[in-house]
Image (cartoon, rainbow, N blue to C red):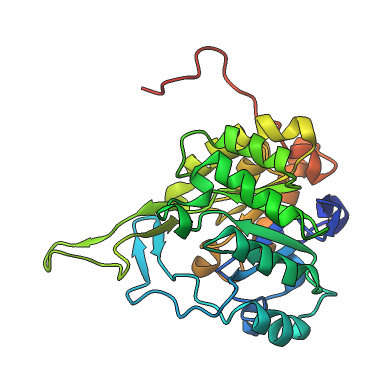
Amino acid sequence: MSEARDDSRLSLEFCGLHFNTPLVLLSGCVGFGEEYTRVAGFSNRDAGAVCLKGTTGAARPGNPPHRVYETPEGMLNAIGLQNPGVEQVVGGILPGLDYDETRFIANVSGSTIEEYIAVTRAFDDSPVDAIEINISCPNVKEGGVAFGNDPDMSARVVEACRSVTQKPLITKLSPNQTDIAENARRCIEAGTDGFAVINTLMGMAVDAESGRAVIGNNQGGLSGPAIKPVALLKVHQVHQVAKAHGIPIIGQGGVTRAEDALEFLLAGASTVGVGTGLFYDPLCLPKILAGINDYMDRHGIGHVSELTGRLQLNEGFSGCGA
């Protein structure tokens, strides 16, 4: 398969923004957008957008080590939102990014509604193109329950952020909840412009010899190919709600090859996030794009947007999988 590609078939509009390609570099995997530009052969032009590292109001040192651990077909991480704080990100980091190559999406995190508002307002007065809301953070005022695991709290965060910015808002949905479709519906009502589906699954690693948890924080977020089946289902479920409102989805969770990206598009994603896959192969983007082009050639598809939601479901009962 050739790695040549037809860019005109791969560019698209997402939340009113022009993306060169349907691939998005995910938050936490490329720092604040400049790290991967140091890899020989890497080009931001292969990415439709880059999601910057999660940013909070004040600087955070992150969790104690170990903070990253490789698992079968995946990776656990518990970085703890290490970042220099929104003031340093906006004033010291954003001015150095090349906005001609790709779109940049800020990632807003917080422990209170007030912190989400403050960080979103700061990014609203910055050159980023859009804002992603990480609602998987614990709400310290509600006993540590994650905002994203409760539809009411999710909607409150989206509504609060919507009130202080006109930039496109992308809500990053957690898989660690009872009904992701209902959560999506509430976020649409609150004003989200798009979704990122899914965030990491919660997991743990144990060292049997020492009898201790491997991750310093005891638990962490599981990413990589191991979570792809869950992510595909969640994208499909959210798409059933979002499509009626024209709300696009960044499908993510275990994408390392063109075949993975195609599966997410068919399940209902408009664009596809690549995160842990960059640790497998930092130069995987042009290979994925070439594979998408090859697939469209073989299936007579004129534009990548035609793939979204083309999944054909089998007839019959679709409840319990046992």
- Residue 138 in view, yes or no: no
Numbered marks: total: 0
Q: Quadrant of residue 307?
A: top right
User: Residue at 83% across / 44% down in the picture?
Assistant: 303
**Residue 156 vertical placement versus 165 (above, below):** above
**Residue found at x 70% / y 49%:** 159
* Residue 7 pos. (x, y %): 84, 58
Say which quadrant the N terminus sits in. bottom right
On screen, residue 264 above or below 169: above
Q: Nearer the viewer, residue 16 or 13?
A: 16
Q: Nearer the viewer, residue 90 or 197?
A: 90
Q: Nearer the viewer, residue 123 or 239?
A: 123
Q: Is residue 122 visible?
A: yes
Please tell me which residue is depicted at 67% across the width and 62% down the height of the picture: 117
Q: Position of residue 239 (x, y in %)?
A: 67, 35
In the rendered structure, the answer to whether residue 92 lies left or right of residue 322 reads right
The picture places residue 124, in percent across and down from the top left corner, at 78, 67
Residue 180 vs residue 226, the one in the foreground: 180
Q: Quadrant of the C terminus?
A: top left
Residue, x 81% and y 73% (percent of image)?
127
Q: Residue furthest top?
A: 316
**Looking at the picture, how far across and down is residue 18, in whole percent?**
86, 58
